[in-house]
Amino acid sequence: MATRSNSRLADSILYPFANIGHLTENPPVVVESGEGVYITDSTGKRYIDGQAGLWNVNVGHGREEIKEAIKAQLDRISYYTIFGGTTNMPSVELAERLCQLTRPEGMVRAFFSSGGSEAVEAAFKLVRQYWRLRGEAAKTKIISLKRGYHGVTLGALSANGITSNREYFEPLLPGFIQVETPHLYGNPYTQDHEELGRICADMLEREIQYQGPGTVAAFIAEPVQGVGGVIVPPANYWPRLREICDKYDILLIADEVVTGFGRLGTMMGSRHWGVKPDIMTFAKGINSGYIPLGATMMNAKVAEAFDTGDAAQFSPKAFAHGNTYAGHPLACAAALASLRIVEDENLPENAGRVGAYFLKRLKEVQSRHHMIGDLRGQGLMIGVELANPETGRPFDISRNVGGRISDHCREKGVIIRNLADTFIISPPFVLETGHVDEMVDTFEEAVASAG
């Protein structure tokens, strides 16, 4: 396959979250193929994919089962809408499968979209229409966490708690409020994890009281925050969230776009904390990224508001939202195949076991290199945060310490994503301990060279 000159790779694409000048000087790697935990570039060089594409290739690259499912569906029909009185069987079967998988959380119905941002956007529209149907139209506000990430559409972005994502697009939508996230590293309140959980939950409750419970529609959070730096909340935090939402009659949305389908070592991230949300949002691992797909799940309490009890074609209770590619048959066929792999190979358990080994190996590195300020994670969702050992504070951004470490790893055949000086490790669930050893040894070498 012919490849373009490296100097032209940044000419025509406006890449997401990337500096054009940097990409012109440092052309992106052209990924040509993948197998399992590995990807191969246009020069034939192979890398361990430490970010699973973008948190999403959970069952690994090149799975024949998923490719065959897509091909088989292509032989039937490549696309047909689920609007206007038609549907397709892969979307029906996937909705049934998702309800089965989330039965412990009490989910009873799925709404399909094209990805994570759209799944979150649908959740916000769902809760606002839900409260109108319940006769409480004043309940419109959405509360989320600082450092939370929920997507890039305007509604999802308004819930984001990451300043750098928000500042270029302000003013954002009204009615979105952020409260403190329970992040132990560097917080000004306490170094006791459980106490921090209580403090931050109390902050949410006070914000609800201040806003007025009759105006708050929902609270949304990731079971473990991803882009914000892989922030693992205290064990008491999510159960307390559920109590607070119940107390003030507020819907609880679990953004499971990253954590759904096994990344934390449990099938659902919410399940890790023993909590049943009212709404769950999925994407990424729903079909391991083979074709874009998102889903918004709801429990019986929410679904009931949209059940009319009559057979009229049009009703004010119909959910007034939808995407052209909702329930895309190829994406849904891929999801059914991917979820079979996740279950048949017990990949959530593997993610938990290998993730624990990964953290153990990284703790050994941390003990030898004092520029690693914090190490945290759950399952195969791990964050490594650098800090200047002389000051205990982040390095000056101009030093590009994280970037140099990431570049060194890439040169040695390991791709680990860095957001400034925080590394996000989110490999496929088929990762083995031998892969971990190679990744950690390479990372330690890179840290030593940057020091």
Image (cartoon, helix red, strand yellow):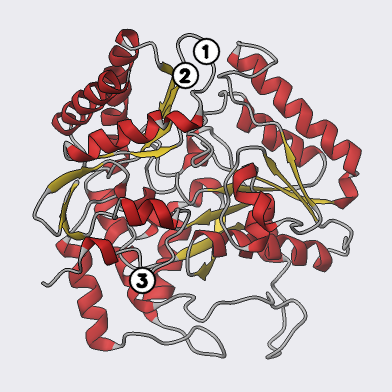
Work out whether residue 160 or residue 232 is closer to the camera in this orientation and state it. 160
Write the residue at 52% across / 31% down. 231
Pair 2/3: label in front: 2
Q: What is the secondary structure assignment of the residue under circle 2? A: loop
User: Residue 141 in the image: x percent, y percent?
Assistant: 80, 53
Q: What is the secondary structure assignment of the residue under circle 1? A: loop
Q: Say few, some or many: other residues with alpha carbon within 10 Å of mark 3 (under 14 / 14 to 19 / 20 or more).
A: many
The amino acid type found where label 1 is placed reads Gly
Give the distance between the C-alpha atoms of the residues marked 2 and 1, in whole angstroms.
Answer: 6 Å
Pair 1/3: label in front: 1
Which of the numbered marks, if any, corresponds to residue 362?
none
Quarter of the image where the C terminus is located:
top left
Can residue 414 be spotted in the picture?
A: no
Q: What is the secondary structure assignment of the residue under circle 3? A: helix
Which of the numbered marks, if any, corresponds to residue 392?
1
Question: Taking 44 as reference, is 317 left or right?
Answer: right
Q: Are marks 2 and 1 in contact (CB under 8 Å)?
A: yes
- In the picture of the structure, the residue carrying the numbered disc 3 is 331
Give the distance between the C-alpha atoms of the residues marked 2 and 3, in whole angstroms.
Answer: 42 Å
The amino acid type found where label 3 is placed reads Ala
User: Residue 56 in the image: x percent, y percent?
Assistant: 36, 52
User: Residue 175 in the image: x percent, y percent?
Assistant: 81, 54
For marks 2 and 3 on the same chain, the one whose residue lies earlier in the sequence: 3
The amino acid type found where label 2 is placed reads Ala
Q: Quadrant of residue 365?
A: top left
For marks 1 and 3 on the same chain, the one whose residue lies earlier in the sequence: 3
- In the picture of the structure, the residue carrying the numbered disc 2 is 387
